[in-house]
Image: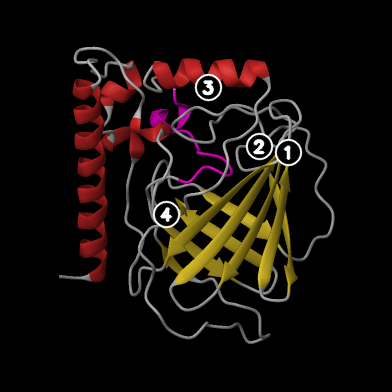
Amino acid sequence: MSNRNSNILAAVAATVMLALSWAASAQQNGNDGKKVRYPGAVRPTKAPPPGPPGPLPRMPDGKPDFSGVWNAQRQLPGDPEPEMLPWAAALTKQRTENYSADDPEARCVPGGVPRATPYHVQMVSTPTLILMLFEGNIHTFRQIFLDRKEHLKITEPLWYGDSIGHWEEDTLVVDTIGFNDKFWFDMAGHPHTTQLHVIERYHRRDYGNLDVEVTVIDPGAYSKPWVQHRLATLTPDADILEYVCNENNQDPDHLTGDAH
C-alpha cells in the first residue's frame, strides 16, 4: 500500500472515530435526537503523530525548502481559548449550536487564512515566492511574496489576503492583511472582521515535520491576539489529487444543520 493510500485511510478512520465518539457523547448526555456540539468545535487532546524523520532539505541559497505535499495542519493541544468580544462569542455559539450549517467553506468557497482544512497542500518554494496549492475545496492557491517588504494597497478585500514573508534564520515569517470577512476560522464558526491581521511562523524542523505558529490579531472581534500552534507532516512521493467540491460534497447534513 502506498504512503498516500495509508494516509487517506488514516484520515478516514480518524473521521469515523470522531463521529462515533460524538454520537456516543450525545446519547450519554441525554441528547439523543437533539443537536449537540459539533465535532469541529472540539479542541485537540493529543498531538498528531510525527512525520517521517530525516535531514532538513535546503534551497541553493541555504534557506529551508518547504517544497512537497503536506498533510493538513493539525492544531496541537494546550493553546488557550480565544478571548472574543461579546458579539463574536455570541455568533460562535450560535454557529456551533446550529451544527455549523452556514459554514461558507462547506459551500465550496475558499477557506481563507488561517483555516486548516482536512486536505493536502502542496508547497512550492522559490527564492522570491512560496506557493500553496490546495487539494480540496475549489483547488485554490495562496501566494507568499518574499521579494516585497510592503503590502499592496487593497481596494477589494481578499479571501487569502496579501501575504509577504521574510526569513528569521530558518523560520519563515508571513504577514497577511487585506481579508474579507466572509470565511470562518474553523468549523466552530469563529468569526473575524476586515481588520484581521495574521502572522504565521513556519519552521521546518526536519524532513517530515513543519511547525506552524499562527497569531490572529483582530481588534474588531477579539480582545487580544489569539495564538495557535500546529503541525503539518510530509507525505513523501505524493501528488495532490483532483477534487471538485461542487461535485463531491459528502456532507449535506452539515449544510442543512440536520444533525442528530
- Verify whether residue 106 appears in magenta: yes
Q: Nearer the viewer, mark 1 or mark 4?
A: 4
Q: Earlier in the sequence, mark 1 or mark 3?
A: 3
Q: Quadrant of residue 98?
A: top left
Q: Quadrant of residue 208?
A: bottom left
Q: Amino acid at mark 3?
A: Thr
Give the CA separation, mark 4 to mark 2.
22 Å
Q: Secondary structure at mark 1?
A: loop
Colour mapping used in the image? secondary structure
| Residue 34 drawn above or below residue 82 | above
Disc 2 target residue: 158
| Residue 119 drawn above or below residue 171 | above
Name the foreground residue: 74 vs 108: 74
Residue 178 badge? 1
Q: Magenta region's main secondary structure?
A: loop
| Residue 54 drawn above or below residue 144 | below
